Image (cartoon, rainbow, N blue to C red):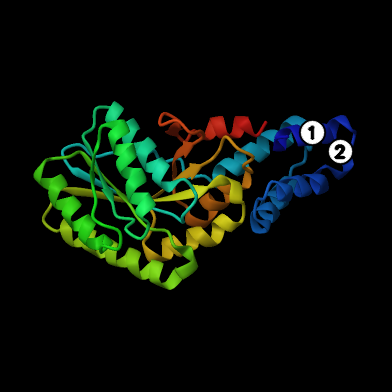
Amino acid sequence: MGIFKKIKNLFKNKEQENVIENLEDILLESDINNEIVIEIINKLTKEKNKNEKTIIEKLKELLSDYINTKKFTLENNKLNILLIVGINGIGKTSSIAKLANKLKNEGKNILISAADTFRAAAIEQMKIYGEQIGIRIISQNQGSDPSAVIFDSISSAKLKNYDALIIDTAGRLQNKENLIKELQKINNVILKQMKNTNINYQKILVIDSTIGKNTNSQAEIFNKAIEIDGIIITKLDSSSRAGAIINISKILKKPIYFTTFGEKLEDIKEFDINEYLNKLL
C-alpha cells in the first residue's frame, strides 16, 4: 500500500488526533531516512489545517523538494562520455544495455566500453547485448587494465565520431579501497583525454531501489571516489520502497536521470517526479 493510501486510511479510521504521529511511522516504514522524516514531521506539525487534503498536498510538496528534477541530455557535436558505476548485482550492465538501446533508437551513434574486466561474465554479457542491439562493444580479456580498455574506447570513439561512449565498470564493493582507487584512476584517464577535446563527460550511479537505506552508504562511497552527476534507479517494478529515491536525492543532491522496471531492453524511461509521486498514492 502506498504512503498516501495509508494516510487516507488514518482519516477514514478517525485517527486525526494522532495523524502526525502515525504519519511518522508510515514514512519510516517506507524506509525514508530518520533525518528526512523528522524534517517533514516538523514542517507538517506547523500546518494549522491538518485535514486529509492539506496533509497529502503538503507532503507531496515536501517530498518534491528533496528531488533534483534536472533532465538527462547529450550535447550535440560532442563526444558524450557516460561513465556508469555501481555495485555488482544491481542491474548495472542491463541498465547500460537499456540506455544504449534507447539512445540508439533516438538516432544516436553509440559505442560501449566493457571495462568491467574483473568478471568474464560481464564482458560476455555486454557482447551479447551488443549483438542484440546492434552496437559495437570494445573489450579486452578478463584481468586487463580497465583504464587501458577505456583509453582505447575513447580513442576509437573520437576517431569515428560517435555521439556517445557508455562505459561499464567493476563494482566490487567488498574491496572498497581498491574500488575507489580504480575509479579515481579511470576518472583521471578520462579527464586527461578531455584536454583540448570536444567532450561532455557525465558520471552516472546505478542504484537498486529494493535495498532501501543500504543505498546511502553505496552512494557516498561512489560520490567520494568520483563526484556523481546523475542517477539511474533500477527494479522499480518490484517491491521497492519509496524511500530509495528520496534518500539518494537528499544525500547526493543529484538528479534521477532514468528508472528501469523490467527485463526487456525497452524497460527504461526518464524519471518523472509527478509520475513517481502519483505512484505513491
Label 2 vs 1, first from the N-terminus: 2
Kindly tell me whether residue 103 is visible in this rendering. Answer: no
Rendered-image quadrant of the N terminus: top right
Q: Residue 93, relative to residue 169: is it above or below?
A: above
Callout 1: SS:
loop
Q: Which mark is residue 16?
A: 2
Q: Where residue 246 sits in the image (x, y, percent)? A: 58, 47
Asked where in the image residue 280 lies, by quadrant, the reply is top right
At horizontal 34% and vertical 31% (from top left) the residue drawn is 102
State left or right for residue 109 relative to residue 270: left
Mark 1 residue type: Asn
| Camera-side residue of 118 and 198 | 118
Q: Residue 194, relative to residue 69: is it above or below?
A: below
Q: How many marks?
A: 2
Rendered-image quadrant of the C terminus: top right
Callout 2: SS:
helix
State left or right for residue 241 relative to residue 221: right
State left or right for residue 177 relative to residue 157: right
State left or right for residue 11 relative to residue 36: right
Q: Where residue 262 sits in the image (x, y, percent)? A: 51, 33
Asked where in the image residue 13 lies, by quadrant, the reply is top right
Q: Residues within 10 Å of mark 1 (few under 14, many from 20)?
A: few
Asked where in the image residue 226 lies, by quadrant, the reply is bottom left
Residue that numbered label 1 is attached to: 51
At horizontal 36% and vertical 44% (from top left) the residue drawn is 125
Q: Where residue 199 sits in the image (x, y, percent)? A: 19, 49
